[in-house]
Amino acid sequence: YDVGTGTVAPRSRSERGPNYRPDPTERRTGNAPTDEIAAVIKRTVEDGRALVSERQVQMKRATTAKSLEEAVNNIRGAVMIAYPMGLPDYDLVRQILEEREELEGAAAMQVLDGGAASLWCFNKELQKEKLLSDYVGKNDKTKVVAKLQKKGAGAPQREPIVSEDEQKAMIAFYHKKQQEAEKLALEDEDAYLHSQWANPKALKSAFTGIGEVSWKAR
């Protein structure tokens, strides 16, 4: 904006590099890193996601704060390799790595401070001075579902009795039985009389060797 003339000068067009990809949010110039470096960033991010995946529980692997910190440092290093000049202050990636991201709505509710959070299980708040074995016993094959909650917020919402897949299977079974019931209701109550086993002359036909005789022309 020119104070003297009161006009706004047109924005100069940024130089487009060989890996230009337009940013739909228009926050970046669109000059992406090379495909090789981009693949490194993606692989590093996927390694970080794997640490917080449910597969860690299935494989009985514990996730530690040290491993998570190393994953974040690896992502930070990959970003520095891709952008050695550094990212601008408004870039979301830089804000996330510097823990300055402003979250809103449901995303803000998912971030809890470790000092101001409590762990709930069995509709009870677990005490930090006690061991988990004090609540579930010493059976190492016991599986529990625990939830984090802000201190003083009360017990979190309980887990559903049946899973989503089980609920879908139950609904499908109910509809199938309902269709079968509707089909049976449409049939005549005397429909069984047309069955072969209900034919009163079946025994006589079996001895004479004569089956059903139709006098209709075919």
Image (tube, rainbow, N blue to C red):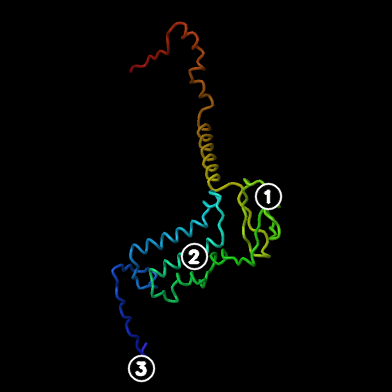
Above or below, 47 against 163 in this view is: below
Q: Say which quarter of the image contains residue 79.
A: bottom left
In the structure shown, which secondary structural element does the residue marked by tag 2 occupy? helix
In the structure shown, which secondary structural element does the residue marked by tag 1 occupy? helix
In the structure shown, which secondary structural element does the residue marked by tag 3 occupy? loop
> Which disc is residue 136 wearing?
1
For badge 2, the amino acid type reads: Val
Q: Which of marks 1 and 3 precedes in the sequence? A: 3
Instruction: Say which of 152 and 139 sits in front.
Output: 139
Instruction: Say which of 49 and 11 sits in front.
Output: 49
Rendered location of residue 183, percent (x, y): 50, 33
Instruction: Say which of 15 and 11 sits in front.
Output: 15
Mark 3 closeness class: few <14, some 14–19, many ≥20 residues within 10 Å = few
Which is in the foreground here, disc 2 or disc 3? 2
Q: Is residue 214 left or right of residue 123?
A: left
> Which disc is residue 4 wearing?
3
Above or below, 172 against 188 in this view is: below
Q: Which residue is mark 2?
A: 72
Q: Say which quarter of the image contains residue 125.
A: bottom right
Q: Which of marks 1 and 2 precedes in the sequence? A: 2
